[in-house]
Image (spheres, rainbow, N blue to C red):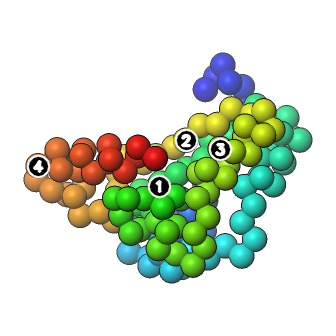
Amino acid sequence: MIKRGYGMFIHFGVNTFTDDEWSDGTTPASKYNPTHLNGDQWVRVARDAGFRYVLLVTKHHDGFCLWDSKYTTYDVGSSPVKTDVVKAVSDACHKYGLQFAVYYSLWDRHDPSFTNKNPQVYIDYMLGNCSI
């Protein structure tokens, strides 16, 4: 990341709509309800501010995915606003010439496989889920 220089870190998810810094994976997906979601605007502002890359939190510790995941219903596909935020921000980065990076939390407070006694169960879930 040091070689990339100046970048924007975007942390946006279900907890944005509950005014919680961290949520625990129990907030209903229906709470995620952005009324004016515009990934293009976020990236355009980043470019205009001189950022060289955008890093998007695609899934934080609460387990909520900013894309329609095949592996969980705790995602935008199960919310009132189905926009694939990962794709929208990635496409905008390409459009404006910024590098795109993702943050995907390994901790998942929502999916029960995280606490399975066999760690491979969660590893399989995580590897499938992050192959977006």
Answer above or below: position of 86 versus 18.
above
Q: Which mark is residue 128?
A: none
Residue at x 78% of width, y 33% of height: 97
Closer mark to the observer between disc 1 and disc 2 = 2
Residue 80: percent from the left, percent from the top?
A: 57, 78
Pick the residue in front: 75 or 70: 70
Quickly name the residue at label 1. 60
Do the CB atoms of the residues marked 1 and 4 lie less than 8 Å apart? no
Q: Is residue 11 left or right of residue 28?
A: right
Q: Is residue 125 left or right of residue 102?
A: left
Q: Which amino acid lies under the numbered mark 1 shown in the image of this protein?
A: His
Residue 92: percent from the left, percent from the top?
A: 74, 45
Say which element carries label 4: loop
Say which element carries label 3: helix
Quickly name the residue at label 3. 90
Answer above or below: position of 82 versus 7.
below
Residue at x 58% of width, y 59% of height: 84
| N-term-proximal mark, 1 vs 2 | 1
The CA span between labels 2 and 4 is: 27 Å
Q: Is residue 38 left or right of residue 69?
A: right
Q: Residues within 10 Å of mark 2 (few under 14, many from 20)?
A: some
| N-term-proximal mark, 4 vs 3 | 3
Quickly name the residue at label 4. 118
Pick the residue in front: 29 or 11: 29
The CA span between labels 1 and 2 is: 11 Å
| N-term-proximal mark, 1 vs 4 | 1
Quickly name the residue at label 2. 102
